[in-house]
Amino acid sequence: QVQLVESGGGVVQAGGSLRLSCTASGSINPTRMGWYRQAPGKQRELVAVIIPNGTSRYADSVKGRFNISRHKVANTVYLQMDSLKPDDTGVYYCHAAFSWAPQGYWGQGTQVTVSS
């Protein structure tokens, strides 16, 4: 059974930074790991994803401010969030996909609140 454990959410003022972490246990070598977020009243949206060769993709709204990285041995993915804006507020979910489970698994979510 795959479990994704997230940490690092919190409350920060606009312009501040937070770092999210997500570790996948129960399986190894995800084919893709990433972060999604859901703001109140809105659909869940992609924030950033990374694949094993290090290639990453970002939502346009976070390009230049967020950075996704991965520790392969630890099956951990990080999201460094800088220059945070109130619009970045939401629940951030970690997602990991595997060759045998392309639909992937979700973490429980961590709240990020950016105050103006």
Image: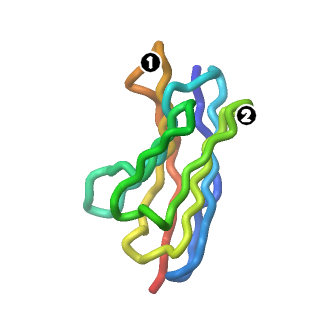
The residue lying at 57 percent from left, 77 percent from top is 12
39 displayed left or right of 65: left
Q: x, y percentage for residue 37?
A: 40, 54
Q: Name the quarter where the C terminus is drawn.
A: bottom left
Q: Nearer the viewer, mark 2 or mark 1?
A: 2
| 100 is higher (above) or lower (below) than 98 | above
C-alpha span from label 2 to label 1: 20 Å
The residue lying at 59 percent from left, 30 percent from top is 3
Q: Which secondary structure lies at badge 2?
A: loop
* Residue kind at label 2, given as amino acid type: Ala
For disc 2, the marked residue is 74
The residue lying at 42 percent from left, 62 percent from top is 63
Residue positioned most to the right: 73
Nearest the camera: 83 or 96? 83
| 52 is higher (above) or lower (below) than 42 | above
Residue positioned most to the top: 100
Q: Earlier in the sequence, mark 2 or mark 1?
A: 2
- Image mark for residue 70: none
Nearest the camera: 49 or 103? 49
For disc 1, the marked residue is 101
Q: x, y percentage for residue 114?
A: 48, 75
Residue positioned most to the bottom: 116
Q: x, y percentage for residue 62?
A: 41, 63
The residue lying at 54 percent from left, 82 percent from top is 13
